[in-house]
Image (cartoon, rainbow, N blue to C red):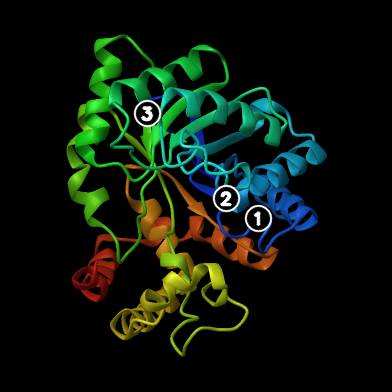
């Protein structure tokens, strides 16, 4: 496994990482979570992504239980979580949901620490921007979280370039802990934010990226070319909003063409798509997801494909997908 610095921070994360969105508690339970995390760790993965809102907090509990059972040295792994939506099971108090105010953030970190069973979280994200809270208040709260030793680094997820830069400038002006990374969606059919909107931030502030959905919610696996399989993520009731994208005829036709490129490189189309994301030098880590060991092992095979993505291969992939991004 290769390791990359998280932006300009000193923290090194594995080129490929493992996330728990959708799967943990919904598709993957404690025994399977432990098995997959162990397999990922044995393959060199050191970054495991989570969020307070995933499965209403149950995802953090599952991951924490797996970590305790596996007894890894704390220096050997990096855990993240994200705050914004709150927990449905705790009610709809006005300061509990869809916010990044100081009160919510100061209590949310304590809840996550308890669910994980950890003394600190390595990396904490603001899961979405909050236009109702002054940005300065959010930046101070995140910086204080680090100063108090409850988190080590912080970042944003799906924030605009303007808001990321504004947050960084506030932190710089007040000598606070700065955001070091952004977690955006990034795949062959979703590129503009990473490749255009954030372009200045990589050099100007050293922004790192922990990208999600490299397979476009499964579209880039090729399994949706003939509809939605009953045992797939797309068939889950909670994932109904994905149906239109997964059954897009033009994109599925493009995936079929990519399968030919993958075959020439000796890999499958999922590995090709994940490797394409990792090929971007601004990406610190590609967050992958899996509901079974065979899927995880296949995804991790993408690392061997990255060096095969020559300029000629990348140009062929662009020819097939760029107009649909």
**Residue 146 to residue 259: above or below:** above
Mark pair 2, 1: CA separation: 8 Å
Residue drawn at 49 percent across, 51 percent down: 287
Q: Earlier in the sequence, mark 3 or mark 1?
A: 1
Residue pointed to by mark 3: 180
Residue 267 coordinates in the image, percent (x, y): 49, 71
Residue drawn at 44 percent across, 78 percent down: 263
Q: Which mark is residue 54?
A: 2
Q: Are marks 2 and 1 in contact (CB under 8 Å)?
A: yes
Q: Earlier in the sequence, mark 2 or mark 1?
A: 1
Neighbour tally class for label 3: few under 14, some 14-19, many 20 plus, Cα within 10 Å: many
Residue pointed to by mark 1: 24
Considering every residue shown, the one lying at the far bottom of the view is: 226
Residue drawn at 28 percent across, 70 percent down: 317
Q: On the image, which quarter does residue 297 sit in?
A: bottom right
Residue 61 coordinates in the image, percent (x, y): 71, 43
94 on left or right of 203: right
Mark pair 3, 2: CA separation: 23 Å
Of circles 3 and 1, which is in front? Answer: 1
The quarter of the image holding the C terminus is: bottom left
Q: Which mark is residue 49?
A: none
Q: Are marks 3 and 2 in contact (CB under 8 Å)?
A: no
**Residue 136 to residue 33: above or below:** above
Q: On the image, which quarter does residue 176 sit in?
A: top left
Mark pair 3, 1: CA separation: 27 Å
Q: On the image, which quarter does residue 316 sit in?
A: bottom left
Q: Are marks 3 and 1 in contact (CB under 8 Å)?
A: no
Q: Is residue 275 visible?
A: yes
Name the element at disc 3: loop
């Amino acid at each position: 496994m290769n390791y990359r610095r998280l932006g300009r921070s000193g923290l090194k994360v594995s080129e490929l990482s493992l996330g728990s969105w959708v799967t943990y508690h919904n598709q993957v339970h404690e025994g399977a979570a432990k098995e997959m995390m162990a397999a990922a760790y044995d393959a060199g993965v050191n970054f495991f992504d989570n969020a307070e809102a995933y499965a209403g907090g149950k995802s953090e509990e599952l991951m924490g239980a797996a970590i305790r059972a596996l007894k890894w040295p704390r220096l050997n792994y990096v855990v993240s979580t994200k705050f914004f939506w709150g927990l449905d099971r705790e009610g709809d108090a006005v300061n509990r949901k869809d916010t990044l105010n100081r009160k919510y953030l100061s209590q949310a970190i304590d809840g996550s620490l308890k669910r994980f069973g950890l003394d600190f979280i390595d990396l904490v994200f603001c899961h979405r921007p909050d236009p109702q809270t002054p940005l300065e208040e959010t930046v101070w709260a995140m910086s204080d979280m680090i100063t108090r030793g409850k988190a080590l680094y912080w970042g944003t997820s799906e924030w605009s370039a303007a808001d990321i830069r504004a947050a960084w400038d506030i932190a710089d002006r007040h000598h606070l802990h700065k955001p070091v990374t952004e977690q955006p969606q990034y795949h062959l059919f979703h590129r503009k934010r990473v490749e255009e909107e954030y372009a200045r931030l990589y050099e100007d502030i050293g922004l790192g990226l922990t990208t999600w959905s490299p397979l476009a919610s499964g579209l880039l696996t090729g399994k949706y070319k003939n509809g939605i399989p009953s045992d797939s993520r797309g068939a889950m009731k909670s994932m109904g909003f994905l149906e239109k994208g997964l059954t897009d005829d033009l994109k599925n036709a493009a995936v079929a063409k990519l399968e030919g490129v993958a075959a020439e490189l000796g890999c499958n189309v999922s590995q090709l798509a994940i490797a394409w994301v990792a090929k971007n030098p601004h990406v610190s880590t590609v967050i992958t997801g899996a509901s079974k060991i065979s899927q995880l092992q296949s995804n991790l095979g993408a690392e061997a494909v990255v060096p095969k993505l020559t300029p000629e291969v990348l140009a062929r992939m662009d020819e097939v997908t760029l107009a649909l991004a």
